[in-house]
């Protein structure tokens, strides 16, 4: 299959919408990272997404909708707290888990949620993506458009380098402004549980309810078992976001201490001041330059720093040096 990269002109958006309507898969920009989109209501299209990414079968997908009413139409239960959060944070990088409504016909096929009783939903803050949802009229499932395990793509070129030959079309919307995947939360009465941190931070959410950051954000999933499905967010159990080079996370008191350490070790590849909008791009760039090892200074796990901390320790496979 030939993979074409095109700009987001109305004709090209029409072409993307037609492909999605026919059950094909297309890479689209979002404000977080590029997504590999398909019709969320079409199990065959969903299967193509899993195949193109070589995604583990038990890792469920996020469904992108135009708003709460589309989520309701899919047969999902929207608690009052979700309405409040949607009003404040949508469209934007916040994914909420909604329970499948028992009394209602389920439109979201089981292949999306992989046996769980919830579906992850968000409204992306990207005009191109929203235009495609409007044109199609159906919800769009989209995981990050990378090969499973590699850093999420923040440009059309990143998508091409992972999925060339496996998908027909990439819509180029330029660089993703945020550069790191959405915050994933579960709602329970008046508690918000963060399963994956992102640009919507615990501090921002705590204005609306009590916030718990799940253990999985800081630690390996080992103590959970996939079989007993006690892992709250299946994707967090896998090796993730990793460049080909070995990543070493370094905990220091200061940037100076980090730089001294890197210099002493004679390393050429390091990130002293990790930023959400460039972290994944730097991993890919260093791989292309032939890096064998990348040292990354761990930020304080507060604000957006928590999301960076979470991605870096996973890329490092929990190999953390404390100075
Ligand atoms: O910013 C984003 O969220 C991007 C863009 C494309 O929207 N998408 C993204 O999708 O990062 P993906 O598939 O790479 O990550 C989805 C995460 C995974 O960790 C998955 O396990 C979790 O969300 N997830 C999906 N459905 C879930 C569910 N029902 N319960 C718990 N976790 C779920
Ligand atoms: Mg992903």
Image (tube, helix red, strand yellow):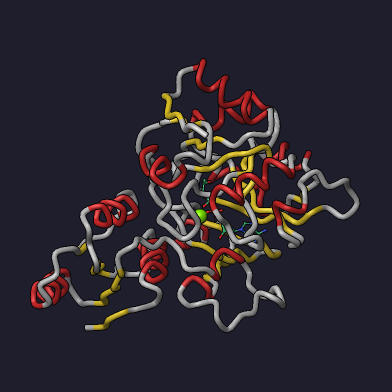
Kindly identify the residue that appears in the image at 72 percent across and 42 percent down.
44
Please provide percent x and percent y for residue 56. Answer: 60, 61
Among the 4 quarters of the image, the one containing residue 264: bottom left
Instruction: Return the x and y of residue 151 as percentages of the image width and height.
Output: 40, 56
Say how many tags the image has.
0
Where does ligand 1 appear, by image quarter?
Answer: bottom right
Task: Using the image, determine if residue 6 lies above or below residue 190.
Answer: above
Of residue 287 and residue 101, the one placed in the foreground of this image is 287
Which residue: 38% across, 71% down? 313
Q: Residue 295 in the image: x percent, y percent?
A: 23, 69
Q: Is residue 247 above or below residue 92?
A: below
Is there any visible trace of residue 38 in the rendered image?
Answer: yes
Q: Is residue 9 left or right of residue 247?
A: right
Task: Name the residue located 39 percent from the left edge and 37 percent from the top edge.
Answer: 156
86 relative to 145 in the view: left or right: right
Q: Residue furthest top?
A: 11
Judged from this view, the residue extending furthest toward the front is 1
For image coordinates 83% across by 47% down, the residue present is 106
91 or 278, which is in the foreground? 278
Q: On the picture, is 20 further left or further right than 202?
A: right
Relative image position of residue 22 (x, y in whole percent): 68, 28
Q: Residue furthest right?
A: 103
Vertical relation: 127 (above or below) 9: below
Q: Quadrant of the rendered structure where residue 243 is?
A: bottom left
Q: Is residue 177 visible?
A: no
Q: Quadrant of the C terminus?
A: bottom left
């Amino acid at each position: 299959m030939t993979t074409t990269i095109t700009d987001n002109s109305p004709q090209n958006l029409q072409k993307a919408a037609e492909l999605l309507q026919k059950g094909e898969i297309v890479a689209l920009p979002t404000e977080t990272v590029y997504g590999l989109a398909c019709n969320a209501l079409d199990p065959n299209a969903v299967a193509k997404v899993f195949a193109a990414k070589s995604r583990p079968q038990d890792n469920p997908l996020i469904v992108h909708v135009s708003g709460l009413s589309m989520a309701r139409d899919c047969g999902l239960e929207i608690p009052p707290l979700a309405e409040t959060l949607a009003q404040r944070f949508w469209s934007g990088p916040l994914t909420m888990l909604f329970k499948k409504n028992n009394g209602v016909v389920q439109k979201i096929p089981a292949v999306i949620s992989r046996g769980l009783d919830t579906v992850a939903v968000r409204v992306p803050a990207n005009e191109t993506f929203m235009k495609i949802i409007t044109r199609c009229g159906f919800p769009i499932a989209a995981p990050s458009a990378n090969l499973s395990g590699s850093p999420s793509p923040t440009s059309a070129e990143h998508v091409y380098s992972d999925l060339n030959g496996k998908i027909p079309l990439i819509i180029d919307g330029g660089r993703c402004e945020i550069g790191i995947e959405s915050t994933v939360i579960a709602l329970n009465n008046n508690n918000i549980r963060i399963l994956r941190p992102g640009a919507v931070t615990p501090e921002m959410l705590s204005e609306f309810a009590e916030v718990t950051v799940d253990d999985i954000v800081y630690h390996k999933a080992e103590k959970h078992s996939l079989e007993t499905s006690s892992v709250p967010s299946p994707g967090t159990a896998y090796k993730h976001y990793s460049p080909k080079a070995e990543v070493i996370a370094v905990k220091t008191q200061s940037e100076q201490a980090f730089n001294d350490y890197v210099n002493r070790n004679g390393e050429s590849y390091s990130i002293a001041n990790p930023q959400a909008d460039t972290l994944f791009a730097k991993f890919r760039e260093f791989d292309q330059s032939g890096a064998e090892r990348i040292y990354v200074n761990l930020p304080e796990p507060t604000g957006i720093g928590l999301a960076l901390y979470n991605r870096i320790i996973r890329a490092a496979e929990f190999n953390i040096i404390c100075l």
